[in-house]
Amino acid sequence: MPSDSPRPPEAAAPKRGLPWRFAGFLATSRLSTDSLGSVFRALPPSEKPDGFVRLRLFDGPDLPRDRVASLLHRATSSNPASPVLVQNARLGAHDGTGWLAWNESHGQSLDRLLSGRSGQGHRFPPEHALLIADRLALALEHASGRGRASHGLLWPGFVILGSAGEVRLGGFGVATAVLPFLSAPSLSAEIAPYLAPETREGEPGGELADVYSVGAILLHLLSGRPAPARAAADAVGPAELYPAGMAELLRLALAPAPRRIERASLLRRRIGAALVASGLQPSSRALAAFAASRLEAETVCGEPLPSGDASASAADEDWELAISRLEPGVDAVRRPRPRSGRPARVPLPPALSPGLPGPARTLPPR
């Protein structure tokens, strides 16, 4: 069998159960599985870990694992400090399997929130959908303004919605390792709908392609289903289905490259214009409450984590108990986890032009 042939996910995750070690990480619970592979909550390789990480293994059934691992081994995924980017992101490969890890922020990945138990998916209220789209556009701005290239593989699996309503984007650096295999059945069905037509056709991406991805995610948030692979702008439907300004926003974000919104900063201006025109008032607290009502909380150390704002305080427990559960017999130093701070004040999207009404607003602190 060729070395680049897919191997079953179980090859990377021993059947002996959790916890288990991989590349120095101590995986404590499985969070989800998708076309890219398995996602775990884990303790990082450290004698005195000060927090969990979200560990993704690229062991999807349709991925040529060895080739992806080789490409990821040469990639980098460090992010600048930003309230809309995941922190301490790093990429690597171990035993023929690529991995991606970043600091855990006690939240849900957006793909889980969108999937829905009934198979029909979940719709988000317009104000929540616009807030998420604005945070993603701001994340692209922060990344490009601080030395990062474009994302290239922006889909809901790399978007984290925190327990306080904060939105963070990860996955920078992964596109070069995954896009060559986008035609694989599971990736084509799950990830390709969020990628620009030029990206699906193998052309170099860029900020223009990332703008399309944000538009595709916004359409899914509003409609409850992914955008079609072709003619996504035509799937928006009549303007009467949306609050004022949103249908035009979607069509411009999902338009073919010559007519598409060119930059993330311009996309944020369009989002600001839609908020002003519709009179919507986004709130991170309301977004957190909505997300908590749609999906059960994930687990920490195999136990349910309370939803909503309570999840952050529940995770502030002493680490002695967690460490002793993970590695019986190991002397655990009593070291409390740092208390979770208030989310940073992030400005709401700017208006399309200075002449538009409405004072500048900021998200309320917790």
Image (tube, grey):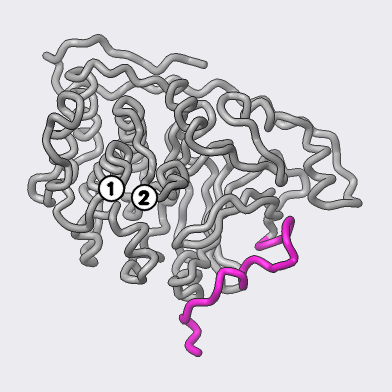
- Specify the quadrant of the image occupied by residue 35: bottom left
Amino acid tagged 2: Trp
| Residue in front for this viewpoint, 62 or 210 | 62
Which residue position is annotated with label 2?
155
Residue shown at the point (25%, 50%) measured from the top left: 227
Instruction: Identify the magenta region.
Output: 1-23
Which residue position is annotated with label 1?
213
Q: Is residue 280 above or below residue 46?
A: above
Which x, y percent locates residue 6?
48, 77
Which x, y percent locates residue 203?
21, 64
**N-terminal-most mark, 2 or 1:** 2
Which x, y percent locates residue 62?
44, 72
| Residue in front for this viewpoint, 149 or 275 | 275
Query: Horizontally, is 10 left or right of 184 in the view?
Result: right
Residue shown at the point (56%, 54%) measured from the top left: 39
Whether tag 2 and tag 1 are in contact, CB under 8 A, the answer is: yes
Q: Around disc 1, counting alpha carbons within 10 Å, would you say few (fewer than 14), some (14 to 19), or many (20 or more)?
A: many
| Residue in front for this viewpoint, 127 or 106 | 127
Is residue 142 visible in the rendered image? The answer is: no
Amino acid tagged 1: Ser
